[in-house]
Image: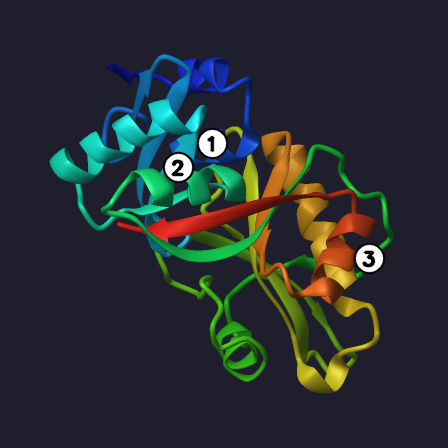
Amino acid sequence: MREVSTTAELARITAGDPMIVWCGQGQLGGRVRAWSAGDAVVVVSPQLSMHDRLAVYGPADEVARLVEYVLAEINPSLRAFGDEELIRELVERVPRLDFAASFGWMHTAVAPSEVTTAAWLESDAGVEELLAEASPDSYAWPGRYGVLRWAGVSGENGELLSIAADAWSAPEIGFLAGVATKPSARGQGLSRQVCAFATAELVKRYGQAGLMVHGYNEAAISVYRKLGYTYRKVAAAHG
C-alpha cells in the first residue's frame, strides 16, 4: 500500500475515471488523501457534497483491504462511494460498512449548444427562498462550503424561477448541483435551460462536468441525458 501524492497520478491509476478524479478535488496531500494497492484505489475527501466521502475503485477484494485500513486509521465514519456493484461487494466483505443508498452519477465532456436565457447570477438574492420552496433537501445552498456560484433564469418581472449551482468542482471536472425550479413555473423547460447553460460553462472551464441524481428521478435523468450526460449506477455505504 502506498499514498498517492498528486491528482495526475490519481487520474493515471484510475484510467481517468471522472468520478474518482472529482473526489480528488485537485488537492491531494492535504485534507484530501488517496492510497493505492495493486489495482485498488481509495480517496478520502472530507465535506465533499455534504459528506465525508471515501471514493473506491478497483477489484473488491483489494479495495476491501484499503477500506478497512482507512476506516481503522483515518476516520471510521467515512461514507464509501463508488460503483453500485463494488459498494455491494464491499458491504459483504467489510463488517464496518452498512449499505446506505443507490443513486446515479452522470457525466459529460460535451458542452450543450442550446440557446438559453440563463446566466450567472450577480448575487445569491432569491436563491435561498427558491430552494426552500422547491428543493429544501438540496445539498447546495448559498454560503455552504464548496458552493461557488449560481446560474438562474428569471421571469419578466425579475423573479428568480430556476437555478443551478457550480459546487464542489475540481480543477479537472466541474460539478452541477442545487438544481431547482419554482413549482408554479415548472413544465416550461426552465430547468433544461439553466442546466444547459451551467453545463456548457462547466465544460468550458473544467473540460468536463458531473452531477449526482436520485435513480428514481426519471424526469431529471431525461433532461440530463438530452444535454449529453451519461448515467452510471453508483451507491454509498456508511462507515
Indicate the secondary structure of the residue bearing disc 1.
helix
Residue under the image location 49 percent in, 20 percent down: 14
First in sequence: mark 3 vs mark 2 = 2
Quarter holding the N terminus is: top left
Q: Earlier in the sequence, mark 3 or mark 1?
A: 1
Q: Write the residue at 62% across / 59% down.
A: 215
Q: Which residue is mark 1?
A: 20
Which image quadrant is residue 7 in?
Answer: top left
Residue 128 falls left or right of residue 179: left
Residue 217: which quarter of the image?
bottom right
Residues at marks 1 and 2, CA–CA distance in whole angstroms = 6 Å
**Residue 99 can be seen in this image:** yes
Observer able to see residue 146: no
* Secondary structure type for disc 3: loop
Residue linked to disc 2: 55
- Give amino acid for label 2: Ala
Is 114 situated above or below 56?
below
**For residue 17, above or below residue 239:** above
